[in-house]
Each structure stands twice: as C-alpha cells, then as structure tokens.
Image: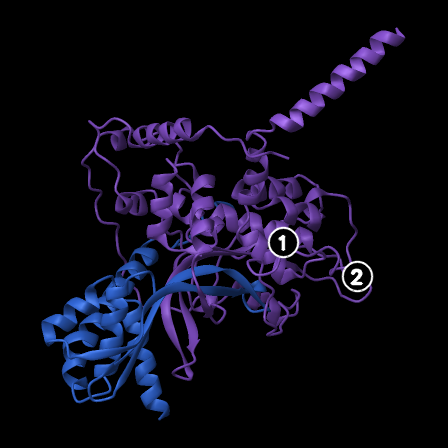
Chain colours: A purple, B blue
Amino acid sequence: MYVAVKGGERAIGNAHAWLEEERRGDVGVAELSVAQIRGQLALSVNRVMAEGALHDPDLAALAIKQARGDLVEAVFLIRAYRTTLPRFGAAQPVETAEMACDRRISATFKDLPGGQVLGPTFDYTHRLLEFRLAAEGGTPEAAPENPAAPEPVPHVAAFLGRDGLIEPAGDGEAVPPDLTREPLELPACRALRLQALARADEGFLLSLAYSTQRGYARNHAFVGELRIGKVAVEMDIPELGFPVEIGEVTLTECETVNQFKGSKTEPPQFTRGYGLAFGQTERKAIAMALVDRALRWRELGEEFTGAPAQDAEFVLSHADNVQATGFLEHIKLPHYVDFQSELELVRKLRAEAEASA
Amino acid sequence: MESANAERQAWMGLLAKAPPGRAAGLLDAAMARPAFAWLRAPETGSVMVRGRAGATGAPFNLGEMTVTRCSLRLGCGTVGHACLQGRSKPDAEAAALIDALMQTGAAAALRTAVLDPLAGERDAARRSRASKAAATKVDFFTMVRGDD
C-alpha cells in the first residue's frame, strides 16, 4: 500500500514546470505542431490510436506531443480522455471486403484477383539511413500513378472457403462483449479476446507471436492476406430509422492460414487467425493474428502445450500496456510505511539469527 | 420513400467524410445561412467501431472513434441531423443545416453548389490514391529456362 503524504506540492509544481520546459526543448529550434506529428509521424499516431482504442488522429498526435514522444504515456492520455466521452452507440461491423486498399499482399497465392499491391511499405528498402532526410526542405516527387480501373479485391480466405479447404469464419450476430464496459472475465470468448488483442501492446504481441513461430505452440502460419486501406463506418441513426456513413477509418487487416491436421469432428483443413487494428499498423495486425490463432487451441480441439501464447489468462491479463505500466510504475510512488514494516521485520529476523548463533 | 432515404443516406455520408471546414465553406459561398433552432446542440462523443472475426464471422469491438452530432430545425419546420467523425462542432452544424436544406426548395441549388463539388473532390482523392496503389501492383514474370 501507499499512504497519502503531504508536503510535496511545491516540488511537484516545480517539477511540472521543468517538464514543460524540457518538453519544448531548445527554443531556437522550431516547435513541433500537432499537424506535423499527425502528418509526418503517422505510424506513431496509428499505434497510439490502436492501443488507445480511440480513432482520432489529431488527439493521438496531441498526446504524442504532450508525452514527449513516449507512446505508452500517449496511449494512457488517450485512454483517460476516452472515458470522458459519452458513448453514442455502436457502428455496424466494417466491411473489409469493400476496403479501398492502399496495400494488399498475399504470401499464399501469387496470382490472385486484385493482385499484389505493395503500397507505401518499408519492405524491400535497404534499411540504410537516408542522410538526405537530415537536410531539411526537401519535397519528394509525387508518387507515380497508374490510373487503372478499380477492380474488386476479394478476401483470399474466400477462395479456400469455396473448396472447403479452410474452416468457415463462423457466424452469429450476437452483441459482442465490451471490455470498456465490463471487466475481463475468463474464459473469454473469441470476440472478447479479439478486442483485448486489438488494444494490446504491440511489443507484447510481437514477442508472443514470435514465440509461436519459434515453436511455443505449434501453428505454422502463412499470411494469407494483409490489407491496409480505408473502410466506411456506418451506424444506425435512431431519429432517421436507417443507417448512414458517419466517417471512414484506415485499418490494417491480417488473416493467417494455418495448417490443421483435423480432429475427431473436423476433417484436415486450414484454420484461421485474425488481426485487425486502426491505422497502418501491420506488425501489430500480423502479431494479433498469430496470437489469436494460438489462443484458439481449445475450440479447435488441439493440445495445450503450456506455451505462453496459448494461455488466455496469461495473454489477456498482461497485454494491456496502460494496466501494465500503471501497476509497474506505481511502485516508484511513496511506500514509506510498507517499507518501514519490512525494515523492522528484517531487523528483527537478523537480531533473532544473531541471538541464536 | 426508399429512394428518398437512399438519397439522404448518400448526402449524409458525403458530408460525414468531407475534409474539415469544406462543407461549411461551400455552404457559405452558396447562400446566407437560414435561421434555425437547435433540437440537440452539437455534442462530441464516441461510437464503437466493430469488426468481424475472420472478416466475415461474428462481430467484435475493435475500438471507438470520436463523433460529433447535432440536430436542428429550420423556420419552416424541416429537421436536419448530422453525425460525423471527429470533434468539429462547426462541421456538424454545417452538415445538419445542409441536411435540412436538402429537404427544402433549396435542394437543387445546394446539390450544385455543395454536394456535387464535395462528391467530385471525394472521387478525385479516391482515384488518386487508387492510382498510386495500382502503380505498386506487382507484375510477375517468369524467367525462361534455358534447357528443354
């Protein structure tokens, strides 16, 4: 426990004033605007939106500025802001098949309807520092355009599904449970797990997903499909009696295709893992799909091998970086009374040990 | 009625996706704003965005988005609603006004002055992005093997 301690007001006030000054940095250097962060640090903004579980790029950019670039702190700020908003309702599930894709690749089929579209990717770059970016004032040439007639971009899993080679995605229109309304309860259904994974820390998911690739929970995953682009968000408006589009969001979606030898009730077929996240966040979406698949061992009749990524309680209880950092960082706050009692205990034990020696 | 709803759906969707300040700018360039009374003053809140497991399966909660909504009534009694992404109250007000005015005699003029330009700009932006994406589409070719 920690107890209320009085007397730090002046020190705290001065510390926060210094924080302001340090945040601004050298006043001889131009101040960063929120618009610059939103536009030029877009992948940081996306991560803060995904883990903050609130889509608002301007707010995410503001949070990054306020947090001096500490993304976990920025996520914390977004989560805190979110709690002040009245909830107007829930949108209809987004139709990712209708996505206006900036990027769409499949690692399982070379030639597929809609094609392999690379989009604005780091893939195939040489990962060499580009020192010309250190020199300011450069405006890049406009990206080449190929004015092609738009063609439909169907989901890869649909091809396999036609031949029954992959498990169905399942159905049901049940109102999904909501972590922001009810605390996590275990066992968690897949809808609840997916919500938790969508807002989970990217680093934590990355490590867990990597562990599955290295053999901790065997599920060899192919990226059946990765797509990034805009989808419309549609909601029923009670006053109108019909749904309208209330905006559009950029999402990253990853569907993995995993080997499955079959079980007592299911024939051998491919199974699926699913990842979806706000913004262009493909490492997160791929990791989410791998962890989603690992967590599905029970419903697929697979063996629990004791791997961390299979353990829903372990994964879901530790995936949230706001919860984690809150508990981790609270131990730096005053624990004087706790420690005093520990100190007395150790002194007493030492005295006893010395007396009996 | 169905087609009237579909038309209204289309313009409300168009207004919701317009860039900040753009619909208001076009409205003000087209006409003086009529008097109105708030039925619900602009308020910002959140809407839960949902996905589906495996893209087509059961719904799950992905995360929220900020949304601003309002409702107003013109002097003639026509009611306009707006519900749009983001936190801009002026944008919500302009969208609700346009929604109301589109149900009045001003519809034709507003379609020409506001909705058509908005739709044109939206389509151009989409085309440009789609064209850039298309330019990154991979053209596979197979190396011809020398032996036969």
The numbered mark at residue B124 is none
Considering only vertical position in the picture, is B113 above or below B143? below
SS of the residue under disc 1? helix
Report the residue marked by disc 1: A292
In this rendering, the count of numbered labels is 2
Q: What's the residue at 59%, 45% (across, down)?
A: A319
Q: Which quarter of the rendered picture does the N terminus of chain B lie within?
A: bottom left
Q: Confirm whether residue A273 shows in the render.
A: no
* Residue A337 image point, x, y percent: 64, 27
SS of the residue under disc 2? loop
Q: Which residue occupies the extreme front position in the image?
A: A6
Report the residue marked by disc 2: A263
Q: Amino acid at mark 1?
A: Asp
Q: Looking at the image, which is closer to me, A141 or B83?
A: B83
Q: Is residue B29 left or right of residue A121?
A: left
* Residue A331 image point, x, y percent: 59, 31
Using a 10 Å C-alpha cutoff, classify the residue at mark 1 as few (fewer than 14 neighbours), some (14 to 19) or many (20 or more): many
* Residue A310 image point, x, y percent: 71, 48
Q: Amino acid at mark 2?
A: Ser
* Residue B7 image point, x, y percent: 30, 84
Query: Who comes first in sequence, dot 2 or dot 1?
Result: 2
Q: Looking at the image, which is closer to me, B60 or A282?
A: B60
Q: For marks 2 and 1, give the CA distance.
A: 19 Å
Q: Looking at the image, which is closer to me, B49 or A115?
A: B49
Q: Chain of mark 2?
A: A
